[in-house]
């Protein structure tokens, strides 16, 4: 090896998708040692390269790619010495200590076979090296133990979460788009379900996209796993690893029970696997538990194995002995013992039944050969009905619930009251989701009156339904009172899952009151609560993501909205949650903002197919579907068609006053009226538009719906301007019209008005009048380098208003970034004093 070689980073892949969420974390850390430790195929090399590409062009980089034979301290020392252009490693430590010019030294894929001495030497060299040397180290094995002191001193920064390094659903869609492949919702769901975003798995499907249609893995992916993972195992290690993959989550006691061996030997083998970086990782919670990387475990379980059924049967027995009925059921099903699974299923709690795994299990058992015992006990009927209600299959839920009559009368008055109260609760929920307000209220209140404290989970769902109804009829005070009561009870029961579930209602209440920041904070904390406990896998997480998408979209944060809608939709599809339809709707509306109408309409077709395939009643989603479709055609300029569709929704609910809109639809009927008013205005019919807008304005003012009040106020001002007959529109008039929306932070609504009424709001401007005085002032502060919050403080206005002004500046100057806006303004002579 010639000593004067300077090692350069490899080229980035042709279809490279930057991942700023990861690169920013590494580049943003002040630590001079960056560790990226994760198993094979997680994109470590590409990530390091992406970071280095963002360094200053003058930065000196030495890139070392470790190889399988570099597995000793001596070999490692020599390789680093060569990278520093030394003839040998005699003076390596002295050279590293006294290095006085900035250098980025990369050790890529630090060998999986490196021994303790090599690890210790690397940690020592790093610790003794000059502050001028920045280390970038990737490794398939965890290096935390050797670098713990440096990490605590914040000299080293570690990125070591396999899940975090995986692609998100949004990134997967963007990656395929680079290859001009537009993934459907189902295709994206397949990829995420089978790969969980594992980089090498996604890249394998990208290289052979026909596998997505065939629902198989490309041959080269199988070859990669065999070469990079299985080839290093002995026959005994291979069989042990396969057992772990089938279990996915395990501890030494469980493995010892299945293999009928001692725990100590199992513990030693597990420790070896963790140290080797072969996709076996310690779980943060609970302690003493391990897991196999989800996509790889899923892949292994799809392959036939002769002893897998016996493993799962033994696992089911062990979990049952521990009282973990949820896991016992899961493994019994995998062992093919449906009847045993049904028997054990009765032992899980109502809280556990809201786990995504159990919802899926219950729906699976609904179609299993063991149907003859499916409705053999009230407990099974309750569980099956609850899963069907959660999934939106209301007709099936009604049919399942009818089986309860076979168990009347009960032997005691308490059992009789509890059984009837459960019937009341489920009947109330079914009526609530259908929009039948009066019977829903009657049944839900009766359930709360008669349900004993043993059924606290069902009581909480009743409070949630009543809260949603109060929101639908505009009684925000009652909604807050009900929600507070429910949240207090969930916390008393220490139920993280139900607390997160109830925070959805709380966030919606805050959104009605235009408290976007508080709503976001609550939803993000709820997401964090669920994510902290790896045992909680629930569709509730998907619903939280969908609500966050709604909030971000209303504030015109399109990138974050797209991320949350996509993630929420994938979670919903994964667990069969009917609320996923709102992910389709949100993404369709984002497409509208980009004028991609064909994609928006295709998303609506996907949404409708999904609902019909899963037997979801039209009353649950049809009105929201038509509203979203009407918004699309309105933006396409088909004003009459939009008016017809929107009038149809309004006529239906006007003729059926006893019905409310679907609880998941946000301000559906007021929004229908506002969009119908805009359809009238765009056709020059100002009188009917005024009546509709005033009706919404007065309703919002009366009930405290501050966001709706602001939106309707801006539209009313626009209608009044059009009615005045003035064709020209000054900057001041535009500001006056949009001010309510901008002040409330409804940036999307303000932008939409400008898009739909471009001609009506068009101003005759000279170059000097291009920006309003207020916008010029904001731009001046932007040019000074101030952040939005600082500008708001200087100008004594809200951050929302600052962001709105900046968005309008971008639009007027036809730019997309602050630096571009400043440069163009200087070119136009708008920032002479800058």
Image (tube, rainbow, N blue to C red):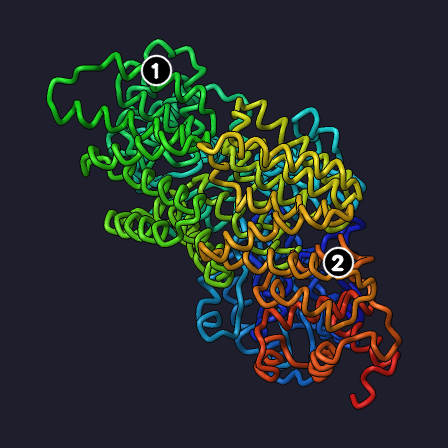
Q: Observer-nearest residue: 23 or 159?
A: 23
Q: Observer-nearest residue: 223 or 486?
A: 486
Q: Number of marks in the image?
A: 2
Under circle 2, the secondary element is helix
Would residue 264 be found to the left or right of residue 162 on screen? left
Q: Earlier in the sequence, mark 1 or mark 2?
A: 1
**Outermost residue, bottom direction?**
833
- Numbered badge on residue 722: 2
Would residue 1 be found to the left or right of residue 122 on screen? right
Identify which residue is drawn at 12% across, 17% down.
411
Would residue 720 be found to the left or right of residue 296 on screen? right
Q: Observer-nearest residue: 809 or 23?
A: 809
The C terminus sits in image quarter: bottom right
Tags 1 and 2 in contact by the CB under 8 Å rule?
A: no
Q: Is residue 198 visible?
A: no
Crowdedness of circle 1 by 10 Å Cα count: few (<14), some, many (20+)?
many
- Give residue 637's quadrant in the image: top right
Against 512, residue 589 (above or below) is above
Q: Observer-nearest residue: 765 or 581?
A: 765
Q: Is residue 452 visible?
A: yes
Residue 796 placement (x, y as % from top left): 57, 81
The N terminus sits in image quarter: bottom right
Against 562, residue 194 (above or below) is above
**Outermost residue, left direction?**
412
Question: Rounded to the nearest whole Å, what is the CA distance between mark 1 and mark 2?
Answer: 63 Å
Residue 78 placement (x, y as % from top left): 66, 67
Q: Which residue has dot 1 on it?
A: 374
Against 649, residue 781 (above or below) is below
């Amino acid at each position: 090896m010639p000593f004067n070689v300077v090692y350069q980073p490899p080229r980035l892949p042709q279809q490279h998708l930057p991942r700023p969420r990861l690169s920013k974390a590494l580049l943003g850390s002040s630590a001079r040692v960056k560790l990226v430790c994760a198993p094979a195929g997680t994109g470590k090399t590409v990530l390091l390269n992406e970071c280095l590409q963002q360094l200053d062009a003058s930065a000196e980089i030495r890139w070392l790619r470790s190889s399988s034979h570099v597995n000793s301290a001596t070999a490692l020392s020599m390789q680093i010495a060569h990278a520093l252009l030394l003839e040998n490693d005699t003076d390596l430590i002295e050279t590293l200590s006294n290095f006085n010019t900035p250098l980025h030294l990369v050790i890529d894929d630090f060998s999986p076979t490196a021994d303790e001495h090599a690890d210790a030497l690397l940690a020592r060299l790093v610790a003794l090296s000059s502050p001028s040397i920045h280390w970038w180290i990737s490794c398939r094995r965890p290096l935390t133990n050797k670098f713990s002191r440096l990490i605590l001193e914040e000299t080293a920064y570690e990125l070591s979460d396999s899940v975090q390094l995986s692609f998100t659903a949004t990134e997967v869609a963007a990656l395929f788009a680079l290859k001009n492949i537009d993934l459907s919702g189902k295709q994206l769901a397949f990829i995420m379900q089978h790969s969980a975003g594992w980089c090498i798995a996604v890249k394998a499907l990208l290289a052979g996209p026909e596998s997505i249609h065939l629902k198989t893995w490309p041959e080269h992916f199988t070859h990669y796993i065999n070469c990079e993972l299985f080839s290093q195992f002995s026959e005994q290690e291979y069989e042990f690893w396969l057992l772990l993959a089938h279990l996915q989550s395990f501890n030494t006691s469980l493995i010892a029970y299945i293999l009928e061996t001692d725990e100590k030997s199992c513990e030693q083998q597990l420790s070896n696997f963790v140290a080797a970086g072969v996709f076996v990782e310690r779980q943060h919670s609970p302690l003493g538990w391990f897991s196999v990387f989800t996509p790889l475990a899923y892949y292994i379980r799809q392959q036939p194995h002769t002893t897998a059924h016996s493993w799962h049967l033994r696992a089911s027995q062990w979990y049952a002995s521990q009282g973990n009925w949820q896991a016992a059921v899961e493994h019994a099903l995998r062992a093919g013992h449906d009847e045993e699974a049904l028997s054990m299923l009765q032992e899980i709690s109502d809280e556990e039944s809201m786990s995504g795994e159990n919802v899926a299990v219950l729906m699976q058992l609904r179609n299993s050969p063991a149907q003859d015992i499916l409705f053999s006990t009230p407990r099974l009927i309750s569980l099956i009905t609850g899963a069907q209600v959660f999934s939106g299959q209301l007709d099936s839920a009604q049919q399942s619930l009818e089986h309860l009559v076979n168990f009347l009368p009960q032997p005691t008055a308490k059992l009789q009251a509890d059984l009837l109260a459960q019937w009341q609760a489920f009947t109330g929920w079914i009526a609530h989701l259908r929009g039948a307000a009066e019977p829903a209220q009657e049944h839900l209140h009766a359930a709360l009156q008669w349900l004993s404290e043993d059924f606290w989970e069902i009581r909480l769902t009743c409070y949630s339904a009543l809260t949603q109804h109060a929101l639908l009829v505009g009684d925000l005070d009652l909604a807050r009172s009900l929600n507070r009561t429910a949240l207090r009870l969930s916390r008393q029961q220490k139920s993280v899952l139900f607390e997160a579930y109830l925070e959805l209602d709380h966030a919606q209440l805050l959104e009605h009151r235009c408290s976007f920041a508080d709503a976001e904070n609550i939803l993000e904390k709820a997401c964090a609560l669920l994510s902290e406990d790896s045992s909680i896998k629930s569709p509730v997480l998907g619903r939280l993501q969908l609500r966050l998408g709604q909030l971000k979209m209303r504030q015109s944060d399109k990138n974050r909205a797209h991320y949350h809608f996509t993630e929420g939709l994938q979670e919903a599809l994964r667990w069969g949650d009917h609320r996923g339809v709102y992910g389709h709707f949100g993404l369709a509306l984002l497409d509208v903002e980009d004028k991609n109408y064909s994609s928006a309409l295709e998303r609506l077709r996907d949404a409708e197919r999904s609902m019909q395939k899963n037997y979801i009643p039209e009353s649950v989603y049809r009105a929201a579907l038509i509203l979203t479709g009407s918004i699309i055609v309105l933006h396409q300029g088909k004003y009459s068609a939009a008016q017809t569709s929107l009038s149809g929704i309004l006529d239906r609910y006007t003729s059926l006053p006893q019905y409310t809109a679907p609880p998941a639809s946000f301000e559906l009927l007021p929004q229908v009226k506002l969009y119908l008013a805009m359809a009238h205005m765009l056709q020059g019919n100002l009188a009917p538009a005024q009546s509709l807008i005033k009706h919404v304005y007065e309703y919002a003012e009366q009930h405290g719906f501050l966001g709706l009040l602001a939106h309707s106020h801006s539209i009313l001002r626009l209608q009044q301007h059009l009615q005045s007959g003035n064709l020209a529109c000054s900057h001041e008039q535009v500001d006056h019209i949009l001010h309510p929306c901008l002040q409330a932070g409804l940036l999307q609504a303000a932008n939409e008005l400008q898009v739909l009424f471009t001609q009506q709001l068009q101003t005759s401007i000279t170059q000097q009048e291009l920006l309003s005085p207020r916008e010029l002032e904001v731009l001046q502060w932007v040019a000074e380098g101030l952040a939005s919050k600082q500008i708001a403080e200087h100008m004594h206005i809200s951050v929302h208003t600052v962001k709105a002004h900046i968005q309008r500046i971008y639009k007027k100057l036809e730019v997309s970034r602050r630096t571009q806006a400043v440069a163009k303004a200087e070119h136009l002579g708008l920032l002479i004093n800058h």
